[in-house]
Image: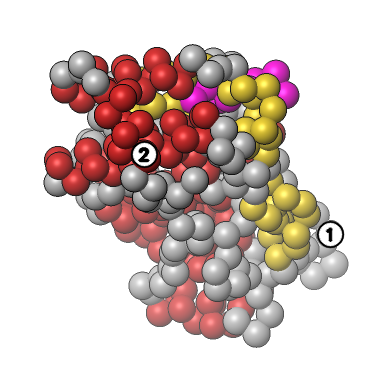
Amino acid sequence: MRTEDPGLDVLIEEITAGTWGEEEQLDAFREAVAEHLPVLSGATVVGEEVTVVDVEVDRGASRRLVAICRRQGRDYAIALVDVRFPPFSPLALLAAAYARWSRERAGVLGLPAPRPRRSWVYPLRTRPDGAAARRLLEACRARPLRLQLVGVWEPTEHDWGEPGAPIAPELRPLIIAGPRPQCQLERVVPPGGEGDREDPIAVALGLVREGHRREARGLLRSLTEREPRCLEAHVLLGHLSFRRSPRAALLHYQTAVAVGELALPRGFNGVLGWGYVDNRPFLRGLHGVGLCSWRLGRLNEAAAVFDTLLWLDPGDNQGELCNLRNVRSRRPWRSTLR
């Protein structure tokens, strides 16, 4: 049934009869939906069949109904409007009525009407400020890193936390967006020197551990000159500068990210999971850009980076969810928050 069917108005009136205010009406919709649960088959989320076992009221800022969906033994809290029920079933009609009530409620309160989020695409285009960094980036344009498709990332197969625990609001759009390509960036690390086959990144890390930071910087700078596509060298230079000068560190991190971005086609909407180790230098570079932006007080830029990292690495292996919440709360950077 189409949601503009006038019969939905009658259904809304029946459900909300005798209620007073938004909270009571939400509870009335919850009770109406709960009478038809569980749904053992036919319900889907992002095209994947789920078992809908319960419905709850999210009494946070969103004030909405969430369905508790079970798939492969795990429960996920998904906004009711994002669950598709069999056409013309009682639950399909109830969900359509609830969606209309939500839109009308938003209009009364002067809020934007809820609508599906467009497919996410990589939003950043990093431009390092320094002339040397731009020169290195230009040298990479003719032969960018390779981007390899390695599979499909399925949100319904991802571990979103303890079974039954609510999913963080910041992560729910990742689920709603559905399956996305799982990709891997090329890792380029040349030999340390003429005839030397030892990994120079490992050598630089050893120098840092031994306290020879100046020597490590020299090695890494020479490495970026010989092979500017070596993201790890740029990122490590950023790490070495971070404590002393976040502006200098930002330039190194930006260079790593800009080089990596050359491999991402326009409209890229894939996942660069942490589990593929070759992706980690790019993810660490983005993480460094976010931390430096935060430390320099550029909170909107930092928020954009941390949000992007959650889309690229839904496993949140670098603590981006916490960082994102902090910068959105306008909380100043502190070293203990890294």
In the rendered image, residue 69 lying in the magenta stretch gets the answer yes
**Residue where numbered disc 2 is placed:** 8
Percent position of residue 165, x then y? 50, 17
Residue 98 appears in the picture as rendered: yes
Q: Quick one: SS at disc 1?
A: loop
Quarter where residue 197 is shown: bottom right
* Foreground of the two, 305 or 192: 305
* Foreground of the two, 310 or 282: 310
Q: Is residue 248 above or below residue 320?
A: below
**Residue where numbered disc 1 is placed:** 197
In the image, is 142 to the left or to the right of 218?
right
Residue at image coords 67%, 33%: 42
Tell me the CA gap for discs 2 and 1: 71 Å
Percent position of residue 112, x then y? 24, 50
- Magenta part of the protein: which range? 67-76
* Foreground of the two, 320 or 105: 105
**Of label 2 and label 1, which has the lower sequence position?**
2
Residue at image coords 21%, 17%: 19
Residue at image coords 43%, 39%: 96
Quarter where residue 334 is shown: top left
Amino acid at pointer 1: Arg
In the image, is 182 to the left or to the right of 94?
right
In the rendered image, residue 229 lying in the magenta stretch gets the answer no
Quarter where residue 14 is shown: top left
The colour scheme used here is secondary structure
